[in-house]
Structure formats: structure tokens, C-alpha cells
Image: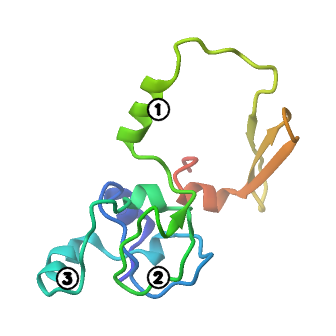
Amino acid sequence: MSITLETAQQHANDPAVCCCRFEEGTIIAPENLEDPAIFPDLEDSGLLTIPENILTIGQVLGAKLTKTLDALTAMTPDNVEGFKASEDEKEEAVKEETAEVSVQSGVASVQALAGDAQVVRIHISEGKDINLEIPVAIAAQMGVIQK
């Protein structure tokens, strides 16, 4: 049974498991995920096995499937790309970085525009002059912005 955005936010640190079959290239949203409340029953019945390298719900929202997954398949780094790093991985990355940080002139800017077709626009001028436009509704679902 798929979950809602509110349930996904409440269970952001729980394992991410497909609720149904989803094709390669699917962008993962709450409706693609199984309700973590039923995992103990599914494990007891042998329908679900949770591997050690499973990603969490918070990590996979907005990421993309790299393989077609059947129902009750665990989402792992092997079948998901663009997932968010876990808190442990973030802490390790911060420790590995040097204390010296240089400020560069090409700073990214983020703006939310008013109107019916709201989007979040991100412009990165340094490098390849990258512009990203994300509909506000999707950004809010991903937890990027608060409504």
C-alpha cells in the first residue's frame, strides 16, 4: 500500500521499499513507497527481506530508479541514482574536507516566483551557466522548500 507525503516525512529514516512494480527511470515519490508500518508482518511472512545497504525514505524521494523494480523490492544504491547521502555519510564528508574554504564569485541563487505556475529557479553562473527550474509543488514534496 503506497504512502502519502505526510507519512513519508514521518518515516524519513525508515527503509525504502517499492509498493508496486515501477519501471527504470521512474522519479521516486511517496506513492511509489510501501508503508513501513507493515514491514514486520511482511518480513515474518518471508515476502520482504531488508538488506544492510537499504536506503531510507528520506534519501530516495526525488531520486531516479536505474532498474525496473518489482513490488516489495528494497531500494539500494544499486538500483537508485541521485539519492541523498545519509547523515553518517555527510558527517564523514565534512570531516574529510579541509578547514580552508575559498569563496568563489559564482554563487548559486535561488528564487521562488509568485503566480499560478510557481517554480523554483536555480541559476549557477560559474562553469556551464546552468539553470534549473523545478515546479514549487514538486520541490515542496521533496522537502526542498516549505509551503
Q: Earlier in the sequence, mark 3 or mark 1?
A: 3
Q: Label 1 belongs to which residue?
A: 93
**23 vs 121: above or below:** below
Residue depth check, mark 3 versus mark 1: number of the one nearer the observer: 1
SS for dot 1: helix
Amino acid type shown at disc 1: Ala
Q: Residue at left 58%, top 47%?
A: 145
SS for dot 3: helix
- In 3D space, how far apart are the residues under numbered discs 3 and 1 (Cα atoms)? 35 Å
SS for dot 2: loop
Q: Residue 20 in the image: state x and y as whole percent.
A: 43, 86
Q: Label 3 belongs to which residue?
A: 42
Amino acid type shown at disc 2: Leu
Q: Quadrant of the N terminus?
A: bottom left
Q: Residue at left 33%, top 60%?
A: 53
In the image, 144 versus 40, the foreground residue is 40
Q: Label 2 belongs to which residue?
A: 69
Q: Residue 5 in the image: state x and y as whole percent.
A: 44, 65
Q: Residue 132 in the image: state x and y as whole percent.
A: 78, 51
| Image-quadrant location for residue 54 | bottom left
Q: Is residue 26 left or right of residue 74?
A: right
In the image, 11 versus 69, the foreground residue is 69
**107 vs 30: above or below:** above
Q: Earlier in the sequence, mark 2 or mark 1?
A: 2
